[in-house]
Amino acid sequence: MKNSLCEKIMWYVLSPTIFKFIKQYWKDIDIKNVKRISKKNYKDMIKRTPDIGSLRKNPLRVCLTSGILWLSIYEAMEGKMDQEQFGEMVSATMEAPILKKNFQKQKAFDIKTQKKKIEKNKIANAVSDSEFNWNTELILGRDENEYTVIYHRCGLCALGKQEHHEELIPYMCKMDYETIAMMGGVLKRKGTIATGADCCDFYICKKGSKWDK
């Protein structure tokens, strides 16, 4: 991948929230050194990760870039951060103001939006057949207050394998519950590829709707 505008924006938007979290819980850490190493790790990891298309054609580039950012900072901590704390860092990232605003303004439970996502998924799936690109299928529900998303392939799983951090990917999966909650929804799923399932099956319904049972 190239260090495109997407990667640069993700660094400047998300890293301040993450470093604030680190500084709060690791009082004796040299935060400047962690930032410096993280930035180098980030650029190096971007270079060795296969491209999955531009952000315009593949919105899930943001997810892959987020994974690169988290793993880059985790490695910069040089053993001071355990797996559970990695998960806490991922959750803390969701507090980034621009991220929360972006998810909260999405009209996930609008039938036109869902149909547009189906068409966008077709484009994103066709951009790259790499294991680093998701293969996404959105299935419309019985009404606009529910829908299903099935991921037949997961780019984060490929990233975890590349960086020898497969054990951390399930902690990234947990953020799905938080992001969908920000959109006013509830996520229910039976499994994820990261935990050994054949696919990631997302059943999503609007919070408080008749399907929220």
Image (spheres, rainbow, N blue to C red):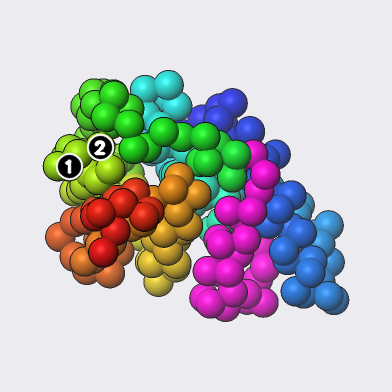
Question: Is 212 rendered above or below residue 26?
Answer: above
Residue 78 within the segment the image draws in magenta: yes
Whether residue 5 sits left or right of residue 109 in the image: it is: right
Residue type marked 2? Glu
**Residue drawn at (37%, 37%) of the image:** 108
Residue 187 position within the rendered picture, expressed as x and y whole percent measured from the top left? 33, 57
Disc number for residue 133: none
Whether residue 178 sits left or right of residue 118 in the image: it is: right
Q: What residue did someone put label 2 on? A: 144
- Boundaries of the magenta span: 76-99
Residue 197 position within the rendered picture, expressed as x and y whole percent measured from the top left? 19, 65
**Residue drawn at (47%, 38%) of the image:** 62
Question: Is 82 rendered above or below residue 48?
Answer: below
Secondary structure found at label 2? loop
Residue 23 position within the rendered picture, expressed as x and y whole percent measured from the top left? 79, 66
Secondary structure found at label 1? loop
Residue type marked 1? Gly
* Mark 2 vs 1: CB contact within 8 A: yes
Q: What residue did someone put label 1 on? A: 141
Residue 37 within the segment the image draws in magenta: no
Which picture quadrant has residue 157? bottom left
Magenta stretch, main secondary structure, is helix
Cα distance between the residues tagged 2 and 1: 7 Å
